[in-house]
Image (tube, rainbow, N blue to C red):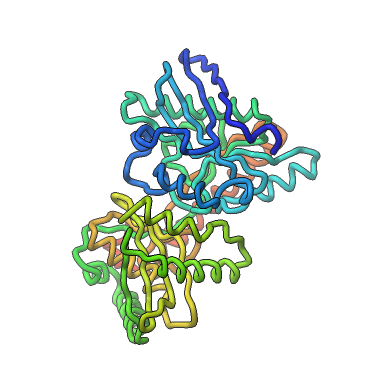
Amino acid sequence: MPGMLDSRPVTAHLAEMTDWSLTLHASIAEIDPVQWGHCAGDDNPFVAHDFFLALEESRSVGPESGWLPRYAVLRGDGQIVALAPLFLKAHSYGEYVFDHGWAQAYEQAGGRYYPKAQIAIPFSPVSGGRLLVSPDMPDAETIRGLFAQALQQACEELGLSSVHMTFCSEDDQNAAVDRGWLPRIGLQYHWENRGYGTFDDFLETLSSRKRKAIRRERREAQSCGLVFRTRRGDEITEADWDGFYAFYQATIDRKWGQAYLTRAFFSQLSERLGTRVVLMQALAGDRPVAGALNLAGTSTLFGRNWGCEGSWPFLHFELCYYRAIDFAIEQGLSRVEAGAQGEHKIQRGYLPRLTRSAHFIRDPALAGPVAAFLEQEREAILRERDDLRSLSPFREENIS
């Protein structure tokens, strides 16, 4: 991407306020970690300074993967007021909110869709804030709107086709849409903790048939002679990561994907994020045969990657879904987000929830058709969500 490999300021001349600017930074190391953390907060580990540093230093993001870091910093009167994890991209892989069709149509019509800007967590369909406003600012809504406007100007100044903000918060989406961005929704499956004291408390809210099915699945998974353990932070050894990385690569190979995350990333993750890294393992004797990687925030457990060697009945459900629920209840977490896709999660207590994105497309000739498509897609997704709710395993008085 010629001309975009340098870090340079992009001045945002905003009508509402003076002395505001947007700068783009080629490394998270250029931004003070205390200031980043002040804006990002502690709840979501995927927007932590150390998470992005691990991605960079392990070479999981960079020219080789096609995710070029350009972290956006909005300043007012010289002070940092908001931040965003922005990347320049020459493809649409690793995003989970796909725009391949838009790119193909635009380029067939003679346009140039790439490079584009992506405000996202690389390779992770994790919901949360993307326009990270300092808590010191009295009007976060206004700041988000100014930030969205500044990002549009950066898009134009750099000659990009578009800016995409994926898996963002509703507040982020609303602020961007108010500045002319296009809204998009999707579906994920989340488990909500309704004050359960034990896993059995959760089961008691389900219909009898679903309760029995889950107990049977857990019983069969736990009767295979496997030992289950959960390790956090520095409890996770390099041998553990060696085994998990083999699982990760095998899963990617089966799905015809690309293993963006390097082996070094996983070691750096537990070193930098400490006990927020939660690795759940199944062992045959002393040998791990499956693993599920999670990151824990202050209120949410985020399921990230899973892999397995061999075939074990219901092991995926046990390790990724049921033990995640166990962990959330024990730790007093409010929610488990188990990643993208999977209607089968509904029967295990993970109900459909909307995810949100916002898209700024410079060329009206493309923005118009995309807006029409997104409106049709939105109606279809809302119908699908309503249909899926009928599959809820909860007793009627516990459905929400």
Which of 350 and 36 lies nearest the eye of the viewer?
Answer: 36
**Residue 226, position as x, y percentages in the image:** 35, 82
Vertical comparison of 298 with 135: above or below: below
Asked if one can make out residue 3 in the rendered structure from this viewpoint, the answer is yes
Q: Quadrant of the C terminus?
A: bottom left
The quarter of the picture where residue 283 lies is bottom left
Vertical comparison of 225 with 392: above or below: below
User: Which residue is at 46% across, 31% downward?
Assistant: 175
The quarter of the picture where residue 339 lies is bottom left
**Residue 318, position as x, y percentages in the image:** 37, 74
Q: Left of 224 or right of it: where is 59?
A: right
Which of 203 and 314 lies nearest the eye of the viewer?
Answer: 314
Asked if one can make out residue 173 in the rendered structure from this viewpoint, the answer is no
**Residue 40, position as x, y percentages in the image:** 37, 38
Q: Left of 186 or right of it: where is 370?
A: right
User: Which residue is at 51% across, 29% downward?
Assistant: 148
Vertical comparison of 81 with 90: above or below: above
Which of 43 and 54 lies nearest the eye of the viewer?
Answer: 54
Residue that extends furthest to the front in the rendered view of this protein: 238
**Residue 258, position as x, y percentages in the image:** 61, 60
User: Which residue is at 69% across, 41% downward?
Assistant: 114
Q: Quadrant of the N terminus?
A: top right
Q: Left of 158 or right of it: where is 122?
A: left
- How many numbered marks, from 0 up? 0
Residue that extends furthest to the left in the rendered view of this protein: 197
